[in-house]
Amino acid sequence: MSGPPTEGYAFRVEARDGDARAGVLVTPHGEVPTPTFMPVGTQGSVKSLSPEEVAATGARVVLGNTYHLWIRPGADVVDDLGGLHRFSRWPHSMLTDSGGFQAFSLTDLVKLTEDGFSFRSHLDGQRMHLSPEEAMRVQGLIGADIAMQLDVCPPGDAALPDVQAAVERTSRWAERCLVARRKDQAVFGIVQGGTNVALRREHARTRGDLPFDGLALCGFSVGEPIEKMHEVLEQVASTLDPERPRYLMGVGTPKDLVRGVAAGVDMFDCVLPTRNARNGQALLRSGRIVIKNAKHRRDPRPLDPTCGCPCCTGGYSRAYLRHLFLAGEILALRLLSVHNLHLFGAIMADARRAIFEGRYASFVREFLSEAAEPAS
Amino acid sequence: MSGPPTEGYAFRVEARDGDARAGVLVTPHGEVPTPTFMPVGTQGSVKSLSPEEVAATGARVVLGNTYHLWIRPGADVVDDLGGLHRFSRWPHSMLTDSGGFQAFSLTDLVKLTEDGFSFRSHLDGQRMHLSPEEAMRVQGLIGADIAMQLDVCPPGDAALPDVQAAVERTSRWAERCLVARRKDQAVFGIVQGGTNVALRREHARTRGDLPFDGLALCGFSVGEPIEKMHEVLEQVASTLDPERPRYLMGVGTPKDLVRGVAAGVDMFDCVLPTRNARNGQALLRSGRIVIKNAKHRRDPRPLDPTCGCPCCTGGYSRAYLRHLFLAGEILALRLLSVHNLHLFGAIMADARRAIFEGRYASFVREFLSEAAEPAS
């Protein structure tokens, strides 16, 4: 590592098992046991849940979306109210993405140049420009513990020259972000390269020369076959600087997380547990429950009798959850969200224990064989 | 009173101050200090909140809507799952309405005869018939502590002959409901009579001869001027049998509650606190906050610094609540609902204390003068 981590931040690996690591990420807002899953609080709220409910799932980092908070309520408003921690009452660690992904994917007529993304707000059509410097300024105002550099994320089916160009621009933007960063905020660098192992490894190597507090793999789960993602991950993740936390952005299912940890990843985020909850899906280790299905109509059982979440231990039956969901009651979305996030937290805790106990390979085998069972 | 109350139920008045009473209603699910406000759990859920959150507002009775639960998930399903208490995990007392009001107001082509309401479900068009006997059968299956007789509720501008006819049919249905009732469930009788004081008083008197566990005033807040309602209430509520709890159905605002208690009412229900919350209104003793208003954009203050609810004491700023509401985040609806229900619970607790301390008249004066301040 070419530079010291930002003051107040640290990362230590406490156990290794193959490429899998169990560690602790330290930020000014506390210690985060890794591997960790970060629930997504797109607009400053993990959808439908209170901060207390999110923390009770085991989560110790939540992710905020810079693009969304920038356009509403405005980064200056968040800053005025004491930063996103105080604004949203989240006492633990927090990370913001750079805003680039949403600026690119949610807006029309986006123009990508060497200076950044020019686009119109999807809310009111206002012209906006997101440069590396602006991404760092906005994230500085939002004030999460960890900011992400601005990067270029090509789609999963992009041609090699486009992937190469994205890598190169991401590299140039990395330098600009490190110049523009807030000095008391950690910044993670981003590795691109699509599904090209050589490109990914080379980009990972050069990222390691920069004083980033962590390194992220971006541009996965963007349309490429999921097996291809895992094939590349297995060859790339472990080549990222072992002294720094490794973050796989926007991934994924419970199986993806367990396999990602095996490949050497420490941090994950995904909207899947909360989004699927709002679509009426309860996730299980062995598949999923589609709560509106008629077979749950008179089912007095909890979603999962082995689950320790407030929904499963509190006496909420599948029959009641089905009724609430069909009736459009918000409580259904809350309970399914709590359950799903609790599952993700429990899987990360189980994975961590398995790494400490040197049985991660068998944990993965068992998990994947269970997870292969049909959905109920 | 012509008959004993149902076994397991009791009502005792512990203090009187003018016509206002402070008492305790006892049901198989515990003691309910009165006056009490009953949050509405239309479809087996007080919208957006968990049972624990509802109970924490001070509520000790929630109301379920028979019509809604009958058509979905079905009274037999609720019964199969152990009744509405267990189904919805509400450990305290519970009351269901008869279903007549919704059958009449939510459905098309409703036909009202001596035998009941014939209509089509607003969900799937299925033909349904709600007779006094069916209302008691369905409420028996749902299994709340307190069932309501089926009644006929004319609109606020109905002509006297129509109001008289409604009173008479409601009386005949009362007898049929008492025959058809579940013997271990309390049943409340209903007083109709619109804004005609003589009719109301006479109906109240004859209701007192029947073995109902409580008496309800229905047909208020159905379009008549609100001052007219209070004028009639003041002359009628105190004439209901003083030995039994008096329930004013579907009312109202904080001011209406405080004045209703002065008139001699013990129990209230209304969707106002939760519905207004979902529309972005936080209720205060001195008016209301329209949370989307621009002036709250950077306001770090809680909704009400004197309020003890989790939203106001938890550090949620008006600025954050405004942001959540504008962003369509469910957490906004939850927090505003908790705040509003907490206010209603606190007002009932304050009213009860004032009655015990013999200063209810001055409490009302003070409350109404505060409440007259402009909304913010």
Image (spheres, coloured by chain):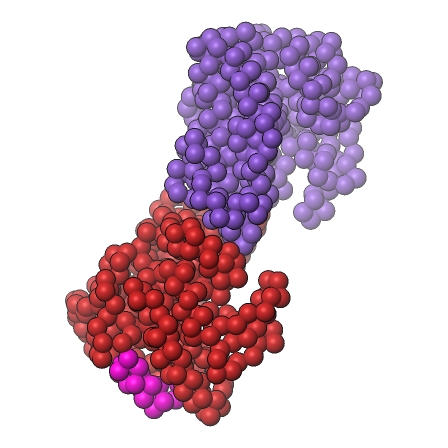
Chain colours: A red, B purple
Between A185 and A163, the residue placed more toward the observer is A185
Between A4 and A60, the residue placed more toward the observer is A4
Residue A177's place in the image compared with B372, above or below, is below
Please provide the residue range marked out in magenta: A193-210
**Dividing the image into 4 quarters, which one contains the N terminus of chain B?**
top right
Residue A333's place in the image compared with B187, above or below, is below
Residue B211's place in the image compared with A74, above or below, is above
Drawn side of residue B87 relative to residue A217, left or right? right
Give the main secondary structure, helix, strand or loop, of the magenta stretch: helix
Between B264 and A108, the residue placed more toward the observer is A108
Between B118 and A6, the residue placed more toward the observer is A6
> How many numbered badges does the structure rendering display?
0
For image coordinates 39% across by 52% down, the residue present is: A82
For image coordinates 52% across by 49% down, the residue present is: B297
Does residue A329 appear in the picture of this structure? no
Drawn side of residue B346 relative to residue B71, left or right? left
The location of residue B168, given as percent across then percent down, is 75, 17
The location of residue A92, given as percent across then percent down, is 31, 55
Drawn side of residue B115 relative to residue B205, left or right? right
